[in-house]
Amino acid sequence: MDMPNAEFWNERFAADSDSGTSLFAGEPNATIAKHVEAIRASFSEGETPRAIDLGSGRGRHTVWLTRSGWSTTALDFSSVGLEHTAAILDHEGLDAELVEGDLTQWNPEPSSFELVLASFIHLPPAQQHRLWEMVASALVPGGYLVSVSHHPDNQIHGPKNPELLYTAKDVVAAFGDTFEVIAAERDVVKRVEDREAVDTVVVLRKR
């Protein structure tokens, strides 16, 4: 099963930077923003909860999380994406930990984050299952996973290989009874003529 590698994403992100967006992070995904804002509101203004942005890309969620009062770590295997993120953070006077690494090899310290953000991560089943295990370990008791991905019914953008797509039920089952389900949805994001963009939205809280 061929997966885009770091070289692919470096070339793509470099092309994006060449288009004149070098100091623009982009707005966060609206669904992610809604759920993360609700979670952030559960902390006091003086607290700085820890978040990790898995597969952070060019940093739109890393930058937004940091602006929103999270102590943020970005993890991605694209050096170009992380360089872009660093430039935006520096431009805005913000600080985050940027880690160049492969999600499939991630071994976090147990109980090291209050929030794990997984935005459109699509791995082969065995690797995806391992990633969920690492997420469960990385979260503190009471910590949250926010995951938004392409649903198997999605018809616009995203991977077409059904092995890389999963439903909310799949994600909930992977975590089991040690997590409370806050949201588990099939979300139709938009329609273009007779096609639909459909996301899988899952928010879980570690018991």
Image (spheres, helix red, strand yellow):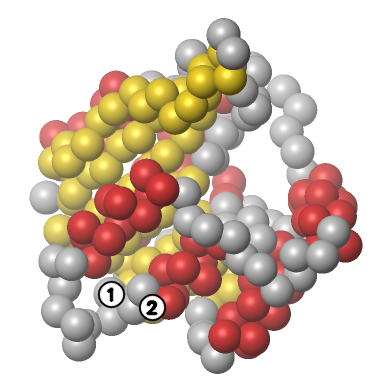
- Going by the numbered disc 1, the residue's amino acid type is Pro
Sort mark 2 into few (<14), some (14-19) or many (20+) by Cα contacts within 10 Å. Answer: many
Task: Please provide percent x and percent y for residue 40.
Answer: 24, 66
Above or below, comparing residue 132 to residue 62 in the picture = above
Q: Of helix, strand and loop, which one carries label 2? A: strand
Task: Please provide percent x and percent y for residue 84.
Answer: 71, 70
Q: Of helix, strand and loop, which one carries label 1? A: loop
Task: Please provide percent x and percent y for residue 133.
Answer: 37, 43
Camera-side residue of 168 and 23: 23
Q: What residue is shown at x 57% (from left), y 53% (from top)?
A: 55
Between the C-alphas of marks 2 and 1, the distance is: 6 Å
The label shown at residue 124 is none
Q: What residue is shown at x 71% (from left), y 63% (from top)?
A: 81
Task: Tell me if I can see residue 101 in this picture.
Answer: no
Q: What residue is shown at x 46% (from left), y 68% (from top)?
A: 64
Are discs 2 and 1 less than 8 Å apart at CB?
A: yes
Q: Residue furthest top?
A: 194
Q: Residue furthest bottom?
A: 93
Sort mark 1 into few (<14), some (14-19) or many (20+) by Cα contacts within 10 Å. Answer: some
Residue 1 placement, left or right of 34: right
Query: Which residue position holds label 1?
Result: 49
Query: Which residue position holds label 2?
Result: 71
Task: Tell which circle, 2 or 1, labels the residue nearer the N-terminal end.
Answer: 1
Residue 167 lies in quadrant: top left
Residue 145 placement, left or right of 200: left
- Going by the numbered disc 2, the residue's amino acid type is Ser
Q: Where does the N terminus fall, quadrant-wise?
A: top right
Task: Please provide percent x and percent y for residue 9.
Answer: 77, 50
Above or below, comparing residue 198 to residue 94 in the picture = above
